[in-house]
Image: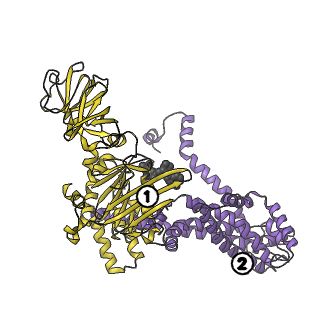
Amino acid sequence: MLAASEPFVTSSRPCSLQSEANVPTVDVKLVDVVKRFGDAVAVDHINLEVMDGEFFSLLGPSGCGKTTTLRMIGGFEEPTSGLIELQGQDVTWLPPYRRNVNTVFQNYALFPHLTIYENVAFGLRRQGVSDPELKSRVHEMLALVELSGFDARKPTQISGGQAQRVALARALINKPAVLLLDEPLGALDLKLRKQMQVELKRIQQEVGITFVYVTHDQEEAMTMSDRIAVMNRGRYEQLGEPEVLYERPTTRFVAGFLGISNLLPGTVGAADGSYAAVRLADDTTVRAPKSLFVADRSGVSVGVRPEKIRMHEQSAEPPAGHNQLSGTVRDASYIGVSTQYIVEARGGAQIMVYEQNVERATKAELWAPGESVRLSWSPDHTFVVTDDEGAAAAAPR
Amino acid sequence: MTASGMTMARPKGTFSERFVRFWNRYLLFIFTGLAILYLMAPVIVIALFSFNDPAGKSNFVWQGFTLDAWLDPFGVAGLQSAVAVSLGIAFASTIISTILGTLIALAIARHVFRGRSATNLFIFLPMATPEIVLGASLLTLFVAIGAPPFFPLSAGTILIAHIMFSISFVVVTVRARLAGFPTHLEEAAMDLGANEITTFRKVTFPLILPGVMAAALLVFSLSIDDFVITNFTAGGTVTFPMFIYAKARIGIPPEVNVIGTIIFLTAVGLVALSTVLSRRRTMRDERLARMQIAEDHK
Ligand SMILES: Nc1ncnc2c1ncn2[C@@H]1O[C@H](COP(=O)(O)OP(=O)(O)OP(=O)(O)O)[C@@H](O)[C@H]1O
Ligand SMILES: [Mg+2]
């Protein structure tokens, strides 16, 4: 993960310090792209830059405009307004066959009347590649997706996972600058999906092609992507590396879409050092990194992930400088690796806490409903969200 | 049958139970047989009477076996030209209406344009209108225009009429086929570098071909046996069905039975051929796939 995200860290340095090969170039650029279907706005002023060789995901709930965005990049849909660039070239009005991108469709869209071999060879035949080279490249590609020897079969004679890999091979063989994938694993069962996630990532690293990947599965996006844009209602609310999105979500929507989070509304108070204080409803004060606060906004929610919280006896003294809350255990569910508690804070908020079953493992040692506890977590694990969606989305990264 | 054989083989149960079992087992065969007999009886009669040696003009009573009609099928005056006219019109109208109908079906299924629903409606009208009304109105129209190629009535006007009603059937058949496959396939082709024309040649057309062929066969048979509309628009031209109709009053010669039998056998032959070809193709595909599966497991 670190190696993969490195280019984007270095990109903030001045270009002159870097050798030519290290400068990540922009492969896909969307400038203020809007797509309307009649009155409905499917994509609402999106600005994006996807870097060369990056695994970039568009993540969001059903109907948020992921497919529409992808189809505009592929050339199957014309934007209502805005600009689409591929490797610096304006392609907004070019048909799909004039763009150096290929697509893996959600339902694979394999040609049913052609064999697997001809399906994979389709793109090369259009380029006029002739036989000895064509044959070796098709076989090479089938080997890459581990389907050697499937040449003569028809798409109806292979399994879903195999069809998915044929679709991938058929697109990759053209060596596109960018590969677009629209929920390519959506039709597969869970086990196969996990397997294919690893497979896809391996292939992407092997061929070094930029992937733009659409999914509504947050776990899938997190495991595979270098960066993710979390979309909601036609725009993205936050864009960044998976860890950043998880650890420091900036909107309520992002915090809720990527995993479970506890959100506590409060008012912004004074800053001390690198932290700022937020006074919660029950009059306790918690601290969060000052950099996370949006200026001129006093009403915010602070958030913390359930696994970041530690539980103590009411009388115990938590680590110095940590945020603290007192409450009563309301529910405890033992699920093997961990126990999930719901704690009702004094102010009435229900707080979810995951505790690894390390120190306490037997029933007698677990916290029981009704017990008074003290919760603590590091201010560095505290994030701040604003409630109106889209506030952070307008600007490019 | 030995005594033990009887007790062993004899199905158990009362007569009515055995009857029900027999009924359940053979019901399908019995009904299929009856249905085929019902459908085939007229054809068998036609074929049989093509070998008849009728005493007078009428070919309704079996008089004796002869090969005369088969050896000289066009021995009756006017039959040859009637068959030639019918075949010519059928081929021409099939080709033209299949091309036009396929294009219309593609337009309706793949594009949103002004007047699309109106087109849809107009396409259905010829199928819903009684033939006699269609024929009469065409006659009125052709006479009213009063200029070639619509007037005087001729093989040309028959062709125009046949193309008109055939288009509807082609559109409906091809559109059903188009509805069955997703636009994604065409997008995939374009994604892989095929322009519109190549996409049509390599993806759309091969996929709708079975529908187009079915439509062509359908409209060919509609054209070759159409009587009502043809009769209104023919003028002095005589087609095969018109020839038979005219002869029916004085007695149909066995040569007509010969032509009818030949047409029937040709149709059956074509269907059999296409079945054999497609089965052979499926078997080849399956054999290849099986061979590969065997290799996979080595
Ligand atoms: N051809 C179309 N005509 C009209 N509305 C459309 C069309 N395509 C998409 N939309 C609308 O645009 C919005 C975004 O659709 P889109 O397909 O991009 O969603 P998505 O994020 O891919 O959702 P999903 O996860 O369900 O695939 C939806 O509200 C959808 O109803
Ligand atoms: Mg979608």
Type of the residue with mark 1: Asp
Pointers 2 and 1 in contact (C-beta within 8 Å): no
The dot on residue A32 is: 1
Instruction: Decide which of B281, A68 is in the foreground and name it.
Output: A68
Percent position (x, y) of residue A65? 44, 51
Q: Indicate the chain on which mark 2 is placed.
A: B
**Secondary structure of the residue carrying numbered label 1:** strand
In the rendered image, the quadrant that contains the C terminus of chain A is: bottom left
Asked which quadrant contains residue A98, the reply is bottom left
- Report the front residue among A201 and B31: A201
Quadrant where the N terminus of chain A lies?
bottom left
In the rendered image, residue B238, in percent from the top left (x then y), is placed at: 81, 75
Q: Which chain is drawn using yellow?
A: A
Three-letter code for the amino acid on which mark 2 is drawn: Gly
Around disc 1, counting alpha carbons within 10 Å, would you say few (fewer than 14), some (14 to 19), or many (20 or more)? some
Rendered residue at 26%/50% (across/down): A223
Query: Which numbered marker is on residue B207?
Result: none
